[in-house]
Amino acid sequence: MVEELALLGGEKAINKEFSLYNSIGNEEVLAAKKVIESGVLSKFLGAWHEDFYGGPNVLEFEKQAAQYFGVKHAVTVNSWTSGLICAVGAIGIEPGDEVIVTPWTMCASATAILHWNAIPVFADIDPETFCLSPKSIEENITEYTKAIMVVDIFGQSADMDAILAIADKYNLKVISDCAQAPGALYDGKYAGTLADVGGYSLNYHKHIHTGEGGILVTNDDYIAERLRLIRNHAEAVVGDKGENDITNMIGYNFRLGEIECAIGIEQLKKLSTFVATRQRAANRLTDGLKSLTGLRTPVINQKGTHVYYYYPLVLDIESLGVSRDRIHEALRAEGVPIGNRYQNIHLLPIFQKKIAYGSNGFPWTSDICKREVSYSKGICPVAEELNDSTYLGIGMCVYALTDTDIDLIVGAFRKVWASLGKLG
């Protein structure tokens, strides 16, 4: 006998609240306590001084992050948004330059480009990995393109071999926004480390966190130093430091404090364990859902691994005969913590109205913008269809899902699938 759906008056399949994910343990508490007791909560000075680079925990966290990710330089910042702003400035982007970016991301990926009065150009995404499509990247390159911002969305790397080949062909810089993919691998290397500059978010709902924060990684000495300058009042430092190239040397207070870095040192030690836990939960979920008709479980790039910040699903609406939103409604009624949209940031008001700095459309209406750039609906059909009608997702870094929790979620999916005909 098929159980009645909760949406239609039946009993819920899941009658519990899932525990929220919390990666903080006693080690972090003790590390933070030690810093507080020292009285040195930050040691940065916004001047050319031995403390320009920060205090002991900042330096140690950066050293350990560089070693962990296998790069020459790691630079901490107070948020990943700050990190993206630093990255775009450090690679030498000029006003009016075009930077290709995905629409399927958090808005900071694009607004970090606008910050330097450059022009975001949206390319479409791969329908399986949700990362930037190399084909669409190349279709959007113009004589004004200077960089590609690759977002390793949901926890796995984009097709970096193809993207780096395009960058080499057109002499473009590459930024890897790996906010959601710390610990993911691509061809045996950590995601974020193959680009000119990359990095990770330390926001509270990421795999590891310090509350807020970010880590930039690069093997380029020049870029690394410019990241540090932009992070810490560059304009006040370059003269005494003897910097000759002061391009984009408008600095900020993007500094991460001693407490956060002390916590980060302990969190970094646990990253591989946290990743393995997410992978185990996701694999169990895939095993339970892969037989359901019209439901596509995550597709993983054969050259890489997935660390499952999100667990993305795609519906075949035509074969199911039921809308995505109706299925989403039924799953939510059963107690499944699932969402039915992500982002199409090219459709946000800032891009639709082309209003950013001031009220007159700067930079798009200024002389620095060299051509008309379209943000109309239809320019990214794959991302738009996913957002409008076929995508579902579970936030794997929102909850600490046990095997029992996963089994409850699988049971709820199967219950809904057994009564799809009642939802049509």
Image: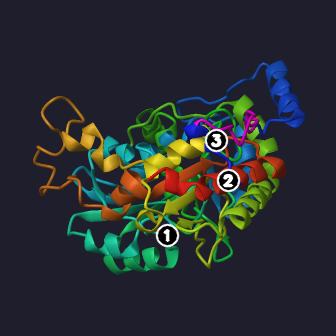
Q: What element carries label 2?
A: loop
Q: Of circles 2 and 3, which is in front?
A: 2
Q: Position of residue 238 (x, y in %)?
A: 44, 41
Q: Where is residue 133 in the image (x, y as percent from the top left)?
A: 40, 70
Q: Position of residue 213 (x, y in %)?
A: 61, 38
Please tell me how crowded label 1 is: few (under 14), some (14-19), or many (20+) other residues with Cα within 10 Å: some
Q: Is residue 18 magenta?
A: yes
The residue at which mark 1 appears reads as 128
Amino acid type, callout 3: Glu
Give 333 or 116, whichever is nearer the viewer. Answer: 333
The residue at which mark 3 appears reads as 334
Query: Which residues, given as a range, are shown in magenta?
Result: 9-21
Q: Position of residue 246 (x, y in %)?
A: 36, 47
54 on left or right of 275: left
Q: Residue at x 51, y 73 (%)?
A: 160
Amino acid type, callout 2: Val
* First along the sequence among labels 1 and 3: 1
Quarter of the image where one finds residue 185? bottom right
| Residue 269 visible | no
Q: Does the magenta stretch include residue 16?
A: yes
Discs 2, 3 touching: Cβ within 8 Å? no
Q: Residue at x 66, y 30 (%)?
A: 257
Main secondary structure type of the part rendered in magenta: loop
The residue at which mark 2 appears reads as 2
